[in-house]
């Protein structure tokens, strides 16, 4: 197993790819400051940010991703998830700068952005290697969709739909049928997202496991489960239900039909997040969740 947290050395970093929350003036200012401070670097930007910056780029995002040596995300966790998806499994370190209020993955405060970047460019910094999930959706035995998530994959009903039956097996062994509004399968990173709202536990992001959390289950005895990351979770939409959807990392949605099967397992790919040297994971929890405050 790979070391989940390690010292990573990058020598001679020249190409940075910037992502930012759309229409965020602060991100535009930071990008201009970065360019002025480091004219020797090749700075690329996702198309939306490039338009706001007035930068002319001729390459596709896929081409820029293939050349990027470091990714800088300016925004919140949603922006970071977008950037991680764009990497498509490439093990490029991501430096997350938090421009919002609730960010568990974008660890670096704005005031520490440029000093933290200097440390990274100096060649040695620590990263957390975050687990991803690979998911596949089957309909009548045919593969319809294949993707990866950093946070979670969710089956959920529409606003006016009735609760549905979700048959779950783990490694082929029957577990239960959730009669519920839906089911969340989350990584440890995603345990502080939707799964937390559904009553799931907070899992340290370096633990190799999955969280399975039913959404508003009909039976109160059906509680969230934590299972080993090496296992395969299968969910089959068993009831004759309409208006049920699959959502992947909050970015992609797909309507489900009765009999559809979702398989979720640990991905071979990882996401590398640059750590904030001034604050550990529990410090972030205390700050973001206001622990110890009245």
Image: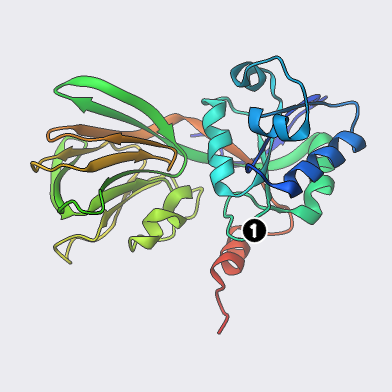
Q: Quick check: 275 above or below 138?
A: below
Q: Residue at x 79, y 53 (%)?
A: 112
With 161 as the anchor, is 47 left or right in this view? right
In this view, the residue in front, 161 or 271, is 161
- Residue at horizontal 30%, vertical 28%? 136
Let me know if residue 100 appears in the view: yes
Seen in the image, is 283 located left or right of residue 149? right
Percent of width and height locating residue 208: 43, 44
Query: What residue would you read off at disc 1?
Result: 280
Tally the numbered discs: 1
Q: Quadrant of residue 32?
A: top right
The one of 281 and 3 positioned closer to us in this rendering:
281
Label 1: element kind? loop
Q: Quadrant of residue 63 in the image?
A: top right
Q: Could one spot residue 129 in this view of the protein? A: no
x and y percent of residue 259 in the render? 12, 33
Location of residue 200 by image quarter: bottom left
Q: Residues within 10 Å of mark 1 (few under 14, many from 20)?
A: few
Q: Is residue 102 left or right of residue 13?
A: left
């Amino acid at each position: 197993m790979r070391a989940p947290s390690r010292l990573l050395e990058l020598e001679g970093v020249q190409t940075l790819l910037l992502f930012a929350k759309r229409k965020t003036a602060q991100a535009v200012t930071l990008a201009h400051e970065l360019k002025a401070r480091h004219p020797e670097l090749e700075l690329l930007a996702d198309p939306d940010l490039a338009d706001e910056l007035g930068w002319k780029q001729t390459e596709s995002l896929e081409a820029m991703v293939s050349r990027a040596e470091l990714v800088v995300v300016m925004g919140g966790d949603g922006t970071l998830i977008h950037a991680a998806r764009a990497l498509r499994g490439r093990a490029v370190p991501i430096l997350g700068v938090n421009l919002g209020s609730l960010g568990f993955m974008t660890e670096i405060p704005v005031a520490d952005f440029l000093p933290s970047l200097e440390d990274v460019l100096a060649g040695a910094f620590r990263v957390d290697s975050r687990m991803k999930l690979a998911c596949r959706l089957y309909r009548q035995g045919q593969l319809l969709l294949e993707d990866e998530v950093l946070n979670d994959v969710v089956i959920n009903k529409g606003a006016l739909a009735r609760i549905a039956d979700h048959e779950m097996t783990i490694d082929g062994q029957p577990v239960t049928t959730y009669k519920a509004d839906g089911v969340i399968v989350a990584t440890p990173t995603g345990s502080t997202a939707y799964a937390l709202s559904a009553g799931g536990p907070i899992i340290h992001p370096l633990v190799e496991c999955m969280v399975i959390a039913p959404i508003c289950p009909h039976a109160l005895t059906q509680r969230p489960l934590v299972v080993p990351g090496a296992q395969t979770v299968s969910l089959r939409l068993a009831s004759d239900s309409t208006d049920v959807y699959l959502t992947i990392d909050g970015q992609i949605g797909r309507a489900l039909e009765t009999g559809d099967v979702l398989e979720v397992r640990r991905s071979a790919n990882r996401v590398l997040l640059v750590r904030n040297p001034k604050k550990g994971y529990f410090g972030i929890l205390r700050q973001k969740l206001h622990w110890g405050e009245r």
